[in-house]
Image (cartoon, rainbow, N blue to C red):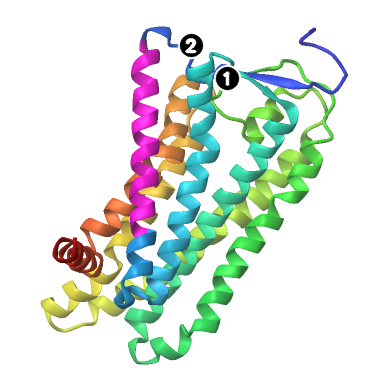
Amino acid sequence: MNEKNETMVTFFILNGLLDIPQLQVLIFLLVLLIYLISLGGNMSILLLVCLDSQLHTPMYFFLCNLSIVNMTSTTVTLHRILVIFVTENNVVSFNDCMAQVYFFGWLCGNELILLTIMSYDRYVAICKPLHYSTVMNSKVYVGLAIFCWSFSLLQILPAMGILSRFSCYTSIKMNHFFCDIIGVMYLSCDDTSILELLIFTQGGLLSVFTPFLLTFISYSFIIATIMRIKTSTGRSKAFYTCSSHLTVVTLHYASLVCQYFTPIGLIKSSKFLSLLNTAVIPMLNPFIYSLKNKDVKSALQRKLEYFMINF
């Protein structure tokens, strides 16, 4: 079909990582390994929290939600790479592309809000420990989780409504390994000014900067409280309770900054940074929470001992 037209396209071609033919097998095996490790690690966290009653606390409830987001987001993005490598067909229909844009945007927004809620949970636990059970009761943390999923589900709809009505595209070839809203927008020859403004205000300020600011405020109070603890042992213990979450937050926002502040000319670097943000970090999250968390390690040890004794 003609790549410059004013009719609604029916498909896009994802070049993805296929422009590096000498590394095809290596990339496929690497992506498959990352995907399997991510699914296995996050599923293990889910099962462990469900099976161990000592982990039935707000923090681990939110961690389960984060694991679900990680498993779903990696499936949304990485499955397309694996399908392309196996079938050698890098064509994606317009409807499938729009669906991928929507679910990716929904899950990204969900993850940022969820990390913000988890930082508030750590703030209450460290700064108001005597009121923790009252403030973070079951109605509150379940309500926060429902808000997280529903708000992120709705906040992407206005942008999707505009994007889906675009009818003119300069090309059907997308230099990415999955469909995202910016990639599709840059291919359009329609007026994208309203969508760009919406991405900046709602996507940038509301969905990214606001969660970052709230997380920063929470940790400012946390650090100030920790510094007022008189004993070094007390300070270490208090900091340890939030170190896993702080590590995940730092990695996540650092990867976002690296990805979206990369010069436009560095396209290949941007794709690999996107792979880092959408695949590698979700894979690392369960290991960070496992290796840096005594409760998780103790629960894992208890369950392993139980299965060894009974089986």
Amino acid identity at mark 2: Asp
Quadrant of res 46: bottom left
Classify mark 1: residues with Cα within 10 Å, few (<14), some (14-19) or many (20+). Answer: some
Quarter of the picture holding the C terminus: bottom left
Residue at image mark 2: 19
Magenta part, dominant SS: helix
Q: Is residue 233 left or right of residue 260?
A: left
In magenta, the rendered stretch is 23-45
Q: Is residue 52 left or right of residue 254?
A: left
**Location of residue 63 in the rendering, given as x and y in whole percent from the top left corner:** 41, 63
Are circles 2 and 1 on residues that touch, CB within 8 Å?
Answer: yes
The residue shown at (34%, 58%) is 45
The extreme right residue here reads 6
Is residue 10 or residue 267 the one in the foreground?
Answer: 10
From the viewer's perspective, is residue 295 above or below residue 265? below
| Image vertical order of residue 256 relative to residue 130, above or below | above
Q: Residue at x 77, y 49 (%)?
A: 158
Secondary structure of the residue carrying numbered label 1:
loop
Residue 6 image position (x, y, % from top left): 87, 18
- Which label number is shown at residue 175? 1
